[in-house]
Amino acid sequence: MKLPEILYFVILFSVLSSCNANKTLSGIYTAKDCDQKYQTVSLITITAPGTIYNGRFVEVNGYYQWGTEESAISDYLVSQKLIWIEFTSGIADSLENKNKSPNENVFDKMSGRRIKIRGTVDTSDHEHLGQYAAAIKYICYLQVY
């Protein structure tokens, strides 16, 4: 086997391995107590002036962003308007137990991915340094695309 052929197989294996690694995170994660009726809404309606969603159980779609003092969802992959999100311990445990590898943070791995969540809106909570438009708490349903 010639060097170019070996390099081709090494690159092909690396690409296929990385694609497969990202797919393992995909799926639906739910907590036991997630049987409330929800309303599907857009993120922009949650933060609109005079919103009626404060205290309501909603379902939203967006991009997850994780980092130091950051666990947020936004309409776009790069956005200044973020909504803080707090997963229930049941979701966090399920996510970590299913996907945890040594030296790997599943929330970091999920960052930048499209997600769907269900939780309760709190428009008075602006979290770390008041930089978030609102918060969605008690998240008991997570779908990672």
Image: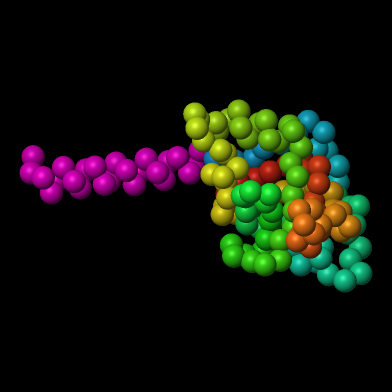
Q: Can the viewer see residue 134 in this picture?
A: yes
5 within the magenta span? yes
Question: Does 137 appear above or below 98?
Answer: below
| Quarter of the figure that contains the N terminus | top left
Q: Position of residue 15 (x, y in %)?
A: 34, 47
Q: Residue at x 48, y 44 (%)?
A: 22
Residue 38 appearing in the image: no
Q: What percent of the width, then of the height, locates residue 92? A: 68, 35
Left or right: 47, with 104 as reference point: right
Residue segment shown in magenta: 1-24
Residue that appears at 91% across and 63% down: 52
Q: Nearer the viewer, residue 37 or 47?
A: 47
Q: Residue at x 61, y 46 (%)?
A: 144
Residue 30 horizontal/vertical position (percent): 72, 36
Colour scheme in use = rainbow
* Residue 62 within the segment the image draws in magenta: no
What's the residue at 35%, 43% (across, down)?
16
Determine the image quadrant of residue 77.
Answer: bottom right
Extreme residue in the left direction: 2
Q: Main secondary structure of the magenta part?
A: helix
